[in-house]
Image (cartoon, rainbow, N blue to C red):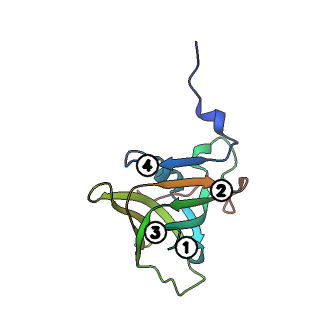
């Protein structure tokens, strides 16, 4: 008899997840909730048709069993045709953004918009030909500078 994988089995391994379907996206969205990053770490690579963010995500998958940790991760969105932002001052290089959620707005024939909602009412809308989002941890986890998990008002 084979045993199902347990959540704890991947605790120390870097995450590498891909969303190719709208049903996959909530998992990645939950894992990047409360990730923080300087506005300068967002890049639209037009020739590669890719939008990427280097962010410091809270390790929600680690639960309450140890000191709160963050890890540097890359969110990569493929097949990008347009990027728009609202409520974000890209000229202010000192701005640090906090990602609250990622959602999908379906369009025609698999195309659509991936909407990244930031704390403080800012958002980035990434128009794509097809949904493909990759989340990949690129450093080892480190103790969260605040020493605690992010909290949200009810």
Q: CA distance from mark 3 to mark 2?
A: 18 Å
- Mark 2 vs mark 1: in front: 1
Disc on the earlier residue, 4 or 1? 4
Give whichever of 50, 38 is nearer the camera: 50
Circle 2 residue: 70
Q: Local crowd at mark 1 within 10 Å, few (<14), some, or many (≥20)?
A: some
Which residue lies under the disc numbered 3? 119
What quarter of the picture does the C terminus occupy?
bottom left
Q: Are marks 2 and 1 in contact (CB under 8 Å)?
A: no
The residue where tag 1 is placed is 43
Between marks 4 and 3, how big is the CA–CA gap? 26 Å
In the image as oriented, which residue stretches furthest toward the front?
47
Q: CA distance from mark 2 to mark 1?
A: 21 Å
Q: Which residue is mark 4?
A: 20
Residue 144 drawn above or below residue 21: below
- SS of the residue at dot 2? strand
Q: Secondary structure at mark 3?
A: loop
**Tag 3–tag 1 contact (CB < 8 Å):** no
Residue depth check, mark 4 versus mark 3: number of the one nearer the observer: 4
Q: Residue furthest left?
A: 108
Calculate the distance from the C-alpha at mark 2 to the C-alpha at mark 4: 25 Å
Q: Residue at x 38, y 57 (%)?
A: 130
Q: Kindly identify which numbered label has been placed on residue 64.
A: none
Question: In the rendered view of the protein, which quadrant contains the N terminus?
Answer: top right
Q: Secondary structure at mark 1?
A: strand
- Residue 71 in the figure: left or right of residue 132: right
**Mark before the other along the chain sequence, 4 or 3:** 4
């Amino acid at each position: 008899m084979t045993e199902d994988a347990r959540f704890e089995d991947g605790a120390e391994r870097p995450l590498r997840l891909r969303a190719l379907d709208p049903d996959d996206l909530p998992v990645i969205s939950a894992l990047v909730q409360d990730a923080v990053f300087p506005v300068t770490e967002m890049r639209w690579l037009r020739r590669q048709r890719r939008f990427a963010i280097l962010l410091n995500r809270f390790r929600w998958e680690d639960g309450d069993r140890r000191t709160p940790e963050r890890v540097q991760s890359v969110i990569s969105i493929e097949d990008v045709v347009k990027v728009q932002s609202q409520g974000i001052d890209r000229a202010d290089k000192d701005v640090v953004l906090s990602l609250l959620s990622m959602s999908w707005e379906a369009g025609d024939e698999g195309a659509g918009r991936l909407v990244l909602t930031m704390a403080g009412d800012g958002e980035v809308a990434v128009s794509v030909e097809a949904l493909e989002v990759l989340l990949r941890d690129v450093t080892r986890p480190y103790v969260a500078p605040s020493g605690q998990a992010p909290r949200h008002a009810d």
